[in-house]
């Protein structure tokens, strides 16, 4: 039986009727057409589906959409502001931290959740924060450098509002 | 991967959840964080007609009672258990074990109760069984085992990271059973049979974990070995408890618990006994680690050999004992009575 849920996605309220067996990942991609969130393994292993739910990064492939009722979801589409990329997105572009791009959305959201709580992370903090995000292309080094660079820019500009 | 269809129930108390379990019986499964259940449902290992989600039940913060015992709600997320100051100071081994689970994302969903009740795992069982036309193994209700074809039982591994730590801490689980509540030491929760791993009744639920007050000159240390630093289940994990005599030289009490190598977490009883009364020194720690490795019998598995596992057990136990001795003798991590 379908249920009505209300949630906030990237600052916008949305209301949907959904079956309990659909995951947040499916609803984001298929119903809301927010295909920036990627579907990799569907099992919690790869982190490609990472979104930020009430401030905490989660694997949206393991969250039932009905359980996002009343909660706030941030996806990669919600990071840019007035057409300007978020400093972490910019750093990923500038540092060459993106190759095929499949891991990038999840990686950036894990990085954002880290920097929100810990604006000056050590390299170990960064590697721990992205340990649930697999990348088959970059070898991680440039991703770590991009997150370091973003933390410097963001701390330098007095932090980022979103 | 698509989840099969199910009806979702969302009780707002453990009491109501237990009532629903009684009503729906075997056709229902409990989901706390869902990080263990949902992958199994996607793999078609589990296909409950009804999922009883515990997410609506209010979660209380960890607290200490007047006797200093630490109470941690079963539905506390692993990330909150790992970052709680109370848990960090009173049961650092539990915080370390919670932090060793999966990834940041998994810890933001997975709960302590779900980790304690984690379904035992095996390479055959934990894969997709959709469009698979082989006979089911013991754990899926059949009559054979693919891992040990000549055996007559299941060899799946109890991989929880928090369980060895809770055994080292002598923690207990508070269980809601019908209208009744009872307490059982975490160590006694496990049957050793991976097909029916828990001693709990079919409709019993864990509501809290209680860690006894920290004792003086005592340290409990958790260590995990896995292929990668993140995401992977343990190849071996280990928790040791060491209590020193008043002069902080001899061992007064010890626990060595080894997880992820058999159907339930194992104690190295002989090695523990051999430590009692001995003056702790590098050779004594080395001997205890060696005894642990020869005493624990790891189950067959397909990702590494038994002799490799024994080496892992030895080095992990040695490292844990060294740290525990350091902490117990320096007073670090120890609370006065
Ligand atoms: C990619 C990935 C990596 C992982 N890595 C690890 C790891 O390194 N170490 C590790 O230990 N685990 C790991 N896990 C397994 C799992 O995420 C954790 O064990 C987690 O703590 C399970 O908690 P949960 O609340 O999500 O469990 P759920 O899936 O909600 O429940 C697990 C089981 O326990 C039962 N249950 C839940 N709560 C209760 C309760 N209060 N009383 C009685 N029964 C209950 C459920 O019925 C179910 O059978 C991993 C999982 C994934 C997907
Ligand atoms: S050990 Fe054997 S019986 Fe147990 S889950 Fe694996 S294949 Fe099945
Ligand atoms: S798609 Fe969710 S973790 Fe891989
Ligand atoms: S850039 Fe291809 S997976 Fe990371």
Image (cartoon, coloured by chain):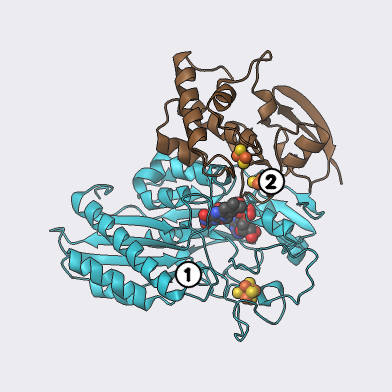
Which residue is painted at 68% across and 81% down in the image? B144
Quarter of the image where one finds residue B329: bottom left
Q: Colour of chain A?
A: brown
Depth check: give the residue in front, B77 or B336.
Answer: B77
Where residue B322 appears, as percent x and y from the top left, is 25, 58
Other residues around mark 1 within 10 Å, as few (<14) / some (14–19) / many (≥20): many
Name the residue tied to disc 1.
B261
Residue B115 vs A160, above or below: the answer is: below
Q: Callout 1: helix, strand or loop? A: loop
Left or right: residue B269 versus residue B179 is left
Q: Callout 2: helix, strand or loop? A: loop
Do dots 2 and 1 share one subunit?
Answer: no
Left or right: residue A21 versus residue A119 is right
> Residue A84: which numbered mark, if any?
none
Q: Chain of mark 1?
A: B
Q: Chain of mark 2?
A: A
Q: Which chain is cyan?
A: B
The image quadrant in which ligand 2 is located: bottom right
Q: Is mark 2 within 8 Å of ligand 3?
A: yes
Q: Is residue B52 visible?
A: yes
Other residues around mark 2 within 10 Å, as few (<14) / some (14–19) / many (≥20): some
Which residue is painted at 70% across and 22% down in the image? A11
Where residue B284 appears, as percent x and y from the top left, is 20, 69
> Residue A40: which numbered mark, if any?
2
Where residue B217 appears, as percent x and y from the top left, is 22, 55
C-alpha gap between disc 2 and disc 1: 30 Å
Q: Is residue B12 visible?
A: no
Where residue B264 appears, as percent x and y from the top left, is 50, 70
Depth check: give the residue in front, A129 or A4.
Answer: A129
Which residue is painted at 76% across and 75% down in the image? B134
Q: Nearer the viewer, mark 2 or mark 1?
A: 2
């Amino acid at each position: 039986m379908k249920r009505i849920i209300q949630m906030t996605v990237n600052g916008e309220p949305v209301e949907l009727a959904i079956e309990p067996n659909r995951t947040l990942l499916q609803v984001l991609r298929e119903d809301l057409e927010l295909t920036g969130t990627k579907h990799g393994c569907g099992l919690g292993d790869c982190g490609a589906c990472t979104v930020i739910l009430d401030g905490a990064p989660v694997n949206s492939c393991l969250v039932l959409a009905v359980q996002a009722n009343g909660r706030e979801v941030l996806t990669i589409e919600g990071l840019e502001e007035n057409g300007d990329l978020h400093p972490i997105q910019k750093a990923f572009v500038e540092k060459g931290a993106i190759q095929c791009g499949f891991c990038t959305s999840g990686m950036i959201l894990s990085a954002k959740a880290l920097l929100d709580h810990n604006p000056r992370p050590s390299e170990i903090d960064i590697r721990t924060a992205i340990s649930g995000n697999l990348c088959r292309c970059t070898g991680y080094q440039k991703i770590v450098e991009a997150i370091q660079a973003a933390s410097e820019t963001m701390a330098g500009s007095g932090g980022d509002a979103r | 991967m698509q989840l099969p269809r199910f009806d979702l129930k969302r009780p707002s108390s453990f009491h109501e959840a237990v009532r629903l379990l009684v009503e729906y019986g075997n056709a229902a499964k409990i989901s706390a964080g869902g990080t263990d259940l949902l992958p199994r449902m996607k793999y078609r290992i589990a296909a409950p007609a009804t999922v009883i989600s515990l997410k609506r039940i209010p979660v209380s913060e960890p607290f200490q009672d007047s006797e200093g015992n630490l109470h941690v709600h079963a539905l506390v997320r692993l990330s909150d258990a790992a970052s709680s100051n109370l848990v960090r100071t009173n049961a650092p081994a539990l915080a370390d074990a919670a932090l060793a689970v999966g990834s940041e994302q998994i810890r933001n969903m997975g709960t302590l109760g779900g980790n304690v009740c984690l379904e035992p795992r095996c390479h055959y069982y934990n894969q997709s069984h959709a469009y698979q036309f082989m006979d089911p193994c013991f754990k899926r209700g059949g009559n054979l085992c693919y891992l040990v074809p000549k055996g007559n039982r299941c060899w799946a591994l109890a991989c929880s990271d928090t369980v060895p730590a809770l055994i080292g801490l002598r923690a207990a689980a508070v269980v809601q059973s019908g209208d009744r509540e009872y307490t059982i030491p975490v160590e006694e929760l496990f049957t050793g049979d991976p097909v029916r791993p828990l001693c709990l009744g079919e409709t019993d639920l864990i509501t809290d974990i209680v860690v006894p007050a920290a004792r003086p000159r005592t340290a409990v240390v958790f260590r995990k070995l896995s292929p990668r630093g993140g995401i992977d289940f343990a190849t071996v994990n280990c928790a040791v408890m060491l209590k020193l005599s008043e002069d902080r030289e001899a061992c007064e009490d010890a626990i060595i618990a080894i997880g992820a190598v058999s159907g339930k977490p194992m104690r190295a009883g002989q090695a523990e006994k051999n430590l009692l009364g001995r003056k702790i020194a590098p050779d004594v720690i080395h001997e205890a680690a060696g005894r642990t490795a020869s005493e624990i019998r790891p189950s067959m598995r397909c990702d590494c050999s038994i002799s490799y596992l024994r080496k892992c057990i030895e080095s992990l136990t040695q490292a844990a004992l060294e740290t525990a001795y350091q902490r117990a003798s320096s007073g670090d991590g120890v609370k006065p009575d």
